[in-house]
Amino acid sequence: MQILIRTGLRIGDARRLALGCLVRDPQGAVYLPYRNHKMRRDAVVPIDDELTTMIEARRARTRQRFPTAGVLLPRSSANPEGQLPIPTARFHRRG
C-alpha cells in the first residue's frame, strides 16, 4: 500500500489511521499525523500531493460505505459502524 511505501509507517500504525488523518500547515503543506505505537508517542510525517489525493479518495469511499467510520481503513465484515480497522493480514495479502 502506498501509505506504507511513501511514509515508512508500520502496518499496525497505518491500519489505525483516523478518518480525518490529514492536516495542513499555514503554508498549505500536508502532514499525516499518527500514533507510533512502538514508541508510544504521537508523530507526524509530511506527505506529497499524490498521496494526499489517494488518501482523500480513500476517505470519500470509506465515508460512502461507513458514514460514521472512525478509521481510514475499516474492516469490511463484522464492522457495521466502520469503527474497526482492517486486520494486519490484509496488508500482507495486498503485497
Image: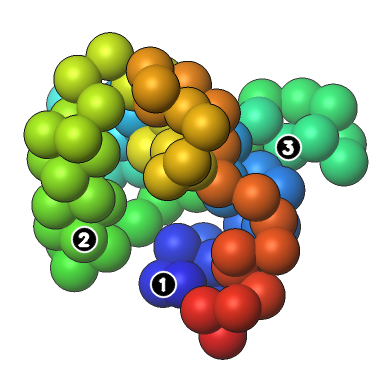
Which of the image's four quarters has the C terminus? bottom right
The CA span between labels 2 and 1 is 9 Å
Q: Position of residue 54 (x, y in %)?
A: 21, 60
Q: State the mark number for residue 2.
A: 1
Circle 1 sits in a helix, a strand or a loop, which is it? helix
Residue at image position (42%, 45%) is: 76
Q: Extreme bottom residue here?
A: 95
Q: Which residue is mark 3?
A: 36
Residue at image position (87%, 36%) is: 39
Q: Mark 3 is on which residue type?
A: Asn
Circle 2 sits in a helix, a strand or a loop, which is it? helix
Q: Position of residue 11 (x, y in %)?
A: 67, 57
As drawn, is 89 to the left or to the right of 46?
A: right
The CA span between labels 1 and 3 is 18 Å
Pointer 1 local density, CA inside 10 Å: few below 14, some 14–19, many at least 20: few
As drawn, is 14 to the left or to the right of 58?
A: right
Disc 2 vs disc 1: Cβ atoms closer than 8 Å?
yes
Disc 1 vs disc 3: Cβ atoms closer than 8 Å?
no
Q: Position of residue 28 (x, y in %)?
A: 14, 38
Looking at the picture, tell me which residue is in the foreground, 66 or 32: 66
Q: Which residue is mark 2?
A: 54
Q: In the picture, residue 36 is in which quadrant? A: top right
- The answer to whether residue 27 is visible is no
Q: From what the image shows, is residue 57 above or below residue 69?
A: below
As drawn, is 76 to the left or to the right of 84?
A: left
Residue at image position (70%, 64%) is: 89
As drawn, is 64 to the left or to the right of 24?
A: left
Q: Mark 2 is on which residue type?
A: Met
The CA span between labels 2 and 3 is 22 Å
Pointer 2 local density, CA inside 10 Å: few below 14, some 14–19, many at least 20: few
